[in-house]
DNA sequence: AATCAAGATAACAACGTTGTTATTCATTTT
DNA sequence: AAAATGAATAACAACGTTGTTATCTTGATT
């Protein structure tokens, strides 16, 4: 039913190996026959059989991604960008939404050249390691806890940058608004850094714990925080989604950003600059994360035991100053407790 | 590097074809050798090479899904369930997050046995049809507009059920809260049905248009709607996400559901019963959609030009009464305009 | 003891590619 | 004119499976 190189060969009156070479633009076949074959292939609707290619070449040109059905914005942007980066290397991205274990099963059957696993706080993944597979694995978002290559952001450092930026602007009452859910190690690292940094500056940490990371959670928490008497002059937000909620809350309470409230948000994504009010951010630019992740994946995929590749990357965050932060207004400033 | 049946054969001292048969549990090989081979395979960490299997069997046992990076809850649940259903048929689900055209490209290379495309309002998909592929395609969520097999919910009918239920309970002021974005045909069908049904009952339709389908949009719209003087006694919500927003709004305004406000929501998902207040819903149970979709996909995948399969399915919605609706309270009822 | 059946295993072709090696044929070189 | 060269193409093996066919045992039947 489907067209193979043999069918083309017959039509063209050449051997099938000539067709193969012509399609791969080998210098071993004459220009004129090459053109003829290419034309025929197009006409006949030829599509190479990847199973056969894979069988002989040992490459699938696919990267499997374990995608823990996330609904948050930032990871969703990240995976989109990684996909784009991988396309540049001629790789195709395939997602599996199963739990890690069974996703690995799927990929064992499908044999992508490498697997990318996103850390998911709902997965008790540690017990299951190491996974039963011989496909190289890259973990995103969790350093130090897996035997596998990892790429991650120095989250703690990002938060420290935020604290320093705000104290540098004269702020003393700086609250942190973020997820404190039980097992989410990514969030924990940020919170620990915040507390440490504040204490080292002799400031009182004020953490607003919330259960989930949705925008509305940020809104509710911010309303509560800002409506109280001794409100902070600055907030560090744990994510883009939360920040949107905080902005809504501030608008509702008629608080001027940044005059009455400075905001620094984690998550360095383009959307931050496109909000009604451009937000000062800390974090690694999501495009850079994507670039580095894709690069590392491709290295891992090419199996050459190249030895020397650095496969425990922690990316350096930066602070990007935008319109949401300014000097603390002395008049509006509360006394530190 | 990787273990093949030939390696096992050598270890076991039998021919590789015997190994193949043993692994597939053929009756043609002795029980004792079968056991020996199975054991060896396990020990040596054998994994069948799917490329080879596919090459000879012409089946990939995979279904490709074009997944338009959706962040809404319901489609996300749906795809999860479809995945589970397909596993029962031994199929594996692979997602591609590319735009339809390039997702098709990916799948052309990977050759799943069928492709499922989710209708996405952001895709101007119609111009591109028909797609360049010979893999069978199933469309979800858009009937009548594609030449491809389709599975869909009778959305209009669902909304009519909602209107009838509410009028049957004596409600006359019934608002519809849903997305009216430009090009979203799925939403349009619901709105049209709502208007028609209301008019046929001599009631004045009241549509609250919103731009997006996120929970917060529902919240904002509901606050505006309910805080006004002549508020409706019932709301029909266009989706689960919106409904959550509406519930929050009602709580904030101290409106009792259902005494002061009845709610019927589109989207028949289990989560509806698990909210603080179980919600009356209309729609096709998401598990049923998943079941029927998987069933149809498998039929399409098995290529047999079975002729007789019905490949334009529209599912019948049902109304599930829960705690969010009750008789209209005469006292609280506004006069219809 | 020679023949037959059957049960068990081995051998082989095929799937659609790629890469290597062999063949053909027209040219150039002697 | 015979030999050497080189370009173009053909032939073939290999990748790891599956399914069909062939071969070899072993024990039962005559």
Image: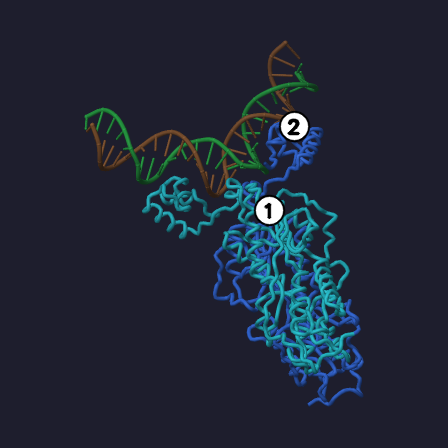
Chain colours: A blue, B cyan, C green, D brown
Residue under label 1, please give it.
B110
Task: Find residue A175 and report its image quarter.
Answer: bottom right
Check disc 2: other Cα within 10 Å, few if <14, some if 14-19, many if 20+: some
Q: Do marks 2 and 1 share a subunit?
A: no
Distance of label 2 from label 1 (alpha carbons): 27 Å
Q: Which mark is residue A12?
A: 2
Pick the residue in front: B183 or B207. Answer: B207
Quadrant, the C terminus of chain A: bottom right
Relative depth, front residue between A129 and A239 = A239
Residue A70 in the image, given as x and y percentages of width and height = 61, 64
Depth order, front residue of A37/B150: B150
Q: Position of residue B161 (x, y in %)?
A: 65, 65
**Residue A275: percent from left, percent from top:** 77, 69
Please say whether residue A232 is visible from this viewpoint.
yes
The answer to whether marks 2 and 1 mark residues whose Cβ atoms lie closer than 8 Å is no
Q: Secondary structure at mark 2?
A: helix
Q: Is residue A193 left or right of residue D12?
A: right
Vertical placement of A57 versus A131: above or below? above
Q: In terms of depth relative to the viewer, which is nearer, A121 or D9? A: A121
Chain ID for label 1?
A: B
Residue B251 numbered mark, or none: none
Residue B96, above or below C26: below
């Amino acid at each position: 039913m489907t067209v193979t190189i043999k069918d083309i060969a017959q039509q063209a009156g050449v051997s099938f190996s000539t067709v193969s070479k012509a399609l791969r633009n080998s210098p071993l076949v004459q220009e004129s026959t090459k053109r003829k074959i290419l034309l025929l292939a197009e006409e006949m609707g030829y599509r190479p059989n990847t199973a056969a290619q894979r069988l002989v070449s040992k490459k699938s040109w696919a990267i499997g991604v374990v995608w823990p059905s996330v609904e948050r914005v930032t990871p969703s942007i990240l995976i989109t960008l990684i996909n784009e980066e991988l396309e540049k290397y001629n790789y195709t991205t395939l997602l599996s939404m199963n739990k890690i274990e069974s996703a690995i099963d799927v990929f064992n059957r499908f044999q992508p050249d490498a697997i990318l696993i996103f850390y998911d706080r709902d997965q008790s993944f540690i017990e299951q390691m190491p996974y039963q597979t011989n496909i190289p694995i890259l973990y995103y978002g969790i350093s130090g806890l897996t035997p596998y290559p990892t790429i991650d952001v120095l989250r703690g450092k990002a938060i420290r940058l935020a604290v320093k930026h705000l104290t540098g602007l004269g702020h003393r009452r700086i609250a942190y608004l973020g997820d404190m859910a039980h097992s989410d190690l990514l969030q924990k690292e940020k919170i620990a850094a915040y507390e440490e940094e504040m204490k080292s500056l002799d400031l009182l940490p004020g953490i607003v714990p919330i259960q989930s990371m949705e925008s509305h959670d940020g809104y509710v928490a911010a309303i509560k925080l800002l409506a109280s008497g001794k409100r902070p002059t600055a907030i560090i937000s744990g994510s883009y989604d939360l920040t949107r909620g905080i902005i809504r809350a501030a608008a509702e309470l008629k608080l001027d950003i940044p005059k009455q409230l400075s905001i620094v948000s984690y998550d360095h994504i383009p959307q931050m600059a496109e909000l009604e009010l451009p937000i000062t951010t800390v974090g690694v630019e999501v495009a850079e994360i994507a670039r580095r992740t894709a690069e590392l994946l491709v290295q891992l995929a090419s199996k050459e035991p190249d030895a020397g590749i650095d496969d425990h990357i922690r990316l350096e965050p930066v602070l990007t100053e935008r319109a949401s932060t300014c000097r603390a207004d002395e008049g509006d400033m509360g006394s530190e407790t």
